[in-house]
């Protein structure tokens, strides 16, 4: 089942009783989360158990909306899965005191409940986001039992079925561990906030502001997509959901303006993915990082701002060059929304964004900040009739927000299975040792292997779940090689995020393909090309700490100037165009010069600068002469 098909089952006024009940359950989950955000979260097992129980109930009941009599066998199966899945999870809530008093000791009944919990959870995850993480979880579960038969580094003494199930089902480091805790607190509040903004019309206001600001330049619609998608992307924190939201507006507009369908889809996919890099809000994964490395969120946002700016410098340059070489015209004046009227008419719907950012900066929790941002959104909506959030729209926002959170919650719970096996067997240290051993203590090779591992492990996963997985498995290898803790986690965060646009499983690109009407794999290849800066930038977190704000103001300032020039030249290499079309050797030269210019060593930077100047001069002199 795709994310899009799941959203279909969540519309208010669903055609039958099951749909209405599902809507009610989604609203209850949203209200429970909002209540917890204001009054404080419950004990871990209560908060996470209730959250996941409702999530599983909603996932399995999705296929029951509009069922036909001929599908009675599937109805019986889904009903059984739903009841069992809900029952084994709500058990923690109903019998919380009894379970807590035994300190994780497993009864015979709980052994079977744990087995059923794992089975139904994996099936729910398969239905919501597909096979990749389910297969990965099954491999890790198998490893917990066959470890004694494995040679060398992967050997462990082996664990009984009771020990594994008890650790995953009753322990705090398994299914109900930190990943699910993040879903039950941070993620769901942020996606509800994002859904509320969308229902109030704030998304359209952001797109209109972006279009009015960029529409008078070449490639205006594509630049508007970059701006609008980045703003919405840092709120939603999910590249796929962002593509499906802003892409419905931006992709048709880009195609009408003359962009190829695959290019329009790729621009939207890359911009939507990159929104998670941009402070002050960033995506949900950034808040998870703050929790894992125990650093203030403001420190993470400060470190991320320069790489994010450089990412968008490259993307803007790529978009502009695409418009120039494709001879795409400027939008007509009557097609452009007016900036001042847009602000006057819809600016009130954006008031919650500075409120949210200010509260985060002031030290309030993500949940509490999200709560007040939602309140401000509702109150501000009453300034105009068109934006007014009626009770029906508020409930619709709750339902849409919960539907967006379902894949993340299922993935986080399944990631808990993987992390539970890792902690039980000590595989995390072994995996880190493997990367260090293969790299031979060569930092650059270790970085390359870590990036590849992050891209593979993150395939098909929401960014939040992907980051949790790679932060557990591969980030410790970099830290053990002397890489700064924050730089190491930003490095794997980029890898996890970029799996959304990396073939063969590029979920954001595939989502854009449906809107652009183009081949998904071609969009994925084009997305990886346009977003190449984000693949390169993490290596400079380590090689040049000035990139994440470490160093004197002069050092950082000099690097910013060098980096901006290098990023523009990197766009020349990506598009193969400066004053005219570039040959393969010139493109390789621009690519090499850009990398050299971003190096911390002054001599290497000067060599890169000289190469770029020479190539620009050569391109200028060899440009086609315009006959008078």
Image (cartoon, helix red, strand yellow):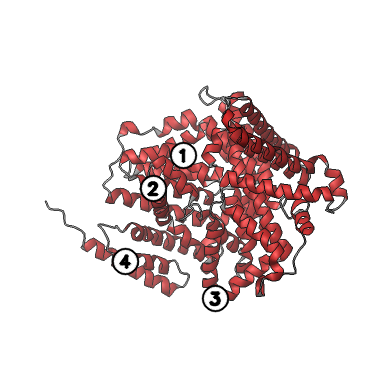
Q: CA distance from mark 1 to mark 4?
A: 38 Å
> With 228 as the anchor, is 622 left or right in this view?
left
Instruction: Give the residue at mark 4.
Output: 613
> With 607 as the anchor, is 88 left or right in this view?
right
For the residue pair 480 and 557, the one nearer the viewer reads as 480
> With 437 as the anchor, is 201 left or right in this view?
left
- Residue shown at the point (21%, 63%) measured from the top left: 621
- Residue shown at the point (61%, 41%) measured from the top left: 405
Res. 67 visible in picture = no
Q: CA distance from mark 1 to mark 2?
A: 20 Å
Crowd class of label 2 (few under 14; some 14 to 19; many from 20; radius 10 Å): some
> With 453 as the anchor, is 150 left or right in this view?
right
Of marks 4 and 3, the one in the foreground:
3
Q: CA distance from mark 1 to mark 3?
A: 42 Å
For the residue pair 219 and 597, the one nearer the viewer reads as 219
Would you identify the image quadrant in which residue 71 lies? Answer: top right
Place of residue 232 in the rendered image (x, y in percent of width and height, measured from the top left) = 51, 42
Would you identify the image quadrant in which residue 83 lies? Answer: top right
User: Is there a contact, CB below 8 Å, between mark 1 and mark 4?
Assistant: no
Instruction: Give the residue at mark 1.
Output: 246
- First reached walking from the N terminus: tag 3 or tag 2: 3
Dot 4 falls on a residue whose secondary structure is: helix
Res. 564 visible in picture = yes
User: Is there a contact, CB below 8 Å, between mark 1 and mark 2?
Assistant: no
Instruction: Give the residue at mark 2.
Output: 519
Instruction: Give the residue at mark 3.
Output: 442
Q: CA distance from mark 3 to mark 2?
A: 39 Å
Dot 3 falls on a residue whose secondary structure is: loop
- Residue shown at the point (59%, 30%) measured from the top left: 65
Dot 2 falls on a residue whose secondary structure is: loop
For the residue pair 510 and 189, the one nearer the viewer reads as 510
Q: CA distance from mark 2 to mark 4?
A: 38 Å
């Amino acid at each position: 089942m795709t994310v899009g098909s799941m959203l279909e089952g969540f519309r208010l006024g669903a055609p039958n009783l099951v749909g209405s009940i599902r809507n009610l359950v989604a609203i209850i989950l949203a209200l429970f989360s909002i209540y917890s955000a204001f009054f404080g979260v419950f004990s871990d097992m209560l908060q996470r158990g209730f959250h996941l129980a409702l999530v599983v109930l909603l996932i399995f009941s999705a296929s029951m909306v509009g069922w036909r009599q001929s599908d009675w066998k599937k109805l019986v199966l889904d009903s059984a899965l739903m009841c069992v899945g809900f029952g084994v999870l709500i058990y923690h809530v109903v019998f919380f005191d009894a379970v807590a008093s035994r300190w994780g000791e497993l009864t015979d009944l709980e052994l079977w409940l744990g087995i059923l919990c794992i089975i139904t959870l994996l099936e729910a995850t398969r239905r919501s986001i597909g096979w990749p993480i389910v297969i990965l979880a099954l491999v890790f579960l198998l490893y917990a039992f066959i470890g004694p038969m494995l040679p060398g580094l992967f050997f462990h003494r082996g664990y009984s079925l009771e020990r594994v199930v008890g650790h995953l089902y009753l322990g705090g480091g398994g299914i109900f561990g930190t990943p699910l805790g993040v879903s039950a607190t941070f993620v769901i509040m942020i996606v509800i906030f994002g859904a509320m903004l969308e229902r109030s019309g704030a998304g359209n206001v952001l797109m209109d502001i972006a279009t009015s600001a960029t529409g008078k330049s070449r490639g205006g619609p594509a630049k508007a997509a970059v701006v609008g998608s980045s703003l919405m992307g840092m709120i939603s924190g999910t590249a796929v959901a962002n593509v499906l939201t802003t892409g419905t507006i931006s992709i048709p507009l880009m195609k009408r303006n003359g962009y190829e369908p695959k290019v329009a889809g790729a621009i939207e996919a890359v911009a939507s993915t990159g929104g998670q890099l941009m402070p002050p809000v960033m995506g949900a994964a950034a808040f998870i990082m703050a929790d894992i490395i125990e650093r203030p969120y403001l420190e993470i946002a400060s470190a991320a701002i320069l790489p994010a700016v450089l990412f968008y410098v490259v993307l803007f340059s790529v978009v502009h060059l695409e418009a120039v070489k494709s001879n795409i015209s400027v939008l007509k004046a009557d097609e452009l929304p007016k900036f001042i009227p847009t602000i006057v008419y819809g600016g009130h719907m954006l008031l919650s964004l500075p409120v949210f950012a200010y509260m985060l900066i002031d030290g309030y929790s993500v949940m509490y900040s999200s709560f007040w941002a939602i309140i401000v959104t509702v109150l501000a909506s009453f300034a105009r009739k068109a934006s007014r959030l009626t009770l029906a729209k508020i409930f619709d926002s709750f339902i849409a927000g919960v539907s967006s959170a379902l894949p993340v919650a299922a993935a986080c719970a399944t990631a808990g299975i993987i992390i539970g096996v890792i902690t039980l067997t000590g595989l995390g240290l072994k995996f880190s040792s493997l990367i260090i051993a293969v790299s031979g203590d060569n930092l650059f090779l270790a970085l390359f292997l870590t990036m590849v591992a992050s891209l593979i492990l993150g395939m098909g996963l929401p960014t939040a779940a992907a980051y949790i997985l790679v932060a557990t498995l591969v980030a410790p290898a970099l830290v053990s090689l002397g890489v700064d803790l924050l730089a190491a986690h930003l490095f794997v965060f980029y890898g996890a995020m970029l799996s959304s646009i990396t073939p063969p499983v590029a979920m954001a690109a595939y989502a854009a393909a449906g809107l652009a009407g183009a081949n998904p794999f071609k969009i994925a290849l084009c997305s990886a090309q346009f977003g190449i800066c984000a693949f390169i930038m993490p290596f400079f977190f380590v090689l040049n700490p000035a990139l994440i704000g470490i160093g004197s103001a002069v050092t950082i300032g000099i690097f910013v100037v060098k980096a901006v020039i290098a990023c523009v030249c990197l766009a020349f290499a990506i598009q193969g165009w400066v004053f005219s079309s570039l040959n393969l050797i010139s493109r390789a030269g621009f690519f090499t010069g850009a990398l050299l210019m971003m190096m911390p060593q002054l001599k290497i930077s000067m060599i890169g600068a000289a190469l770029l100047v020479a190539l620009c001069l050569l391109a200028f002199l060899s440009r086609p002469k315009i006959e008078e």
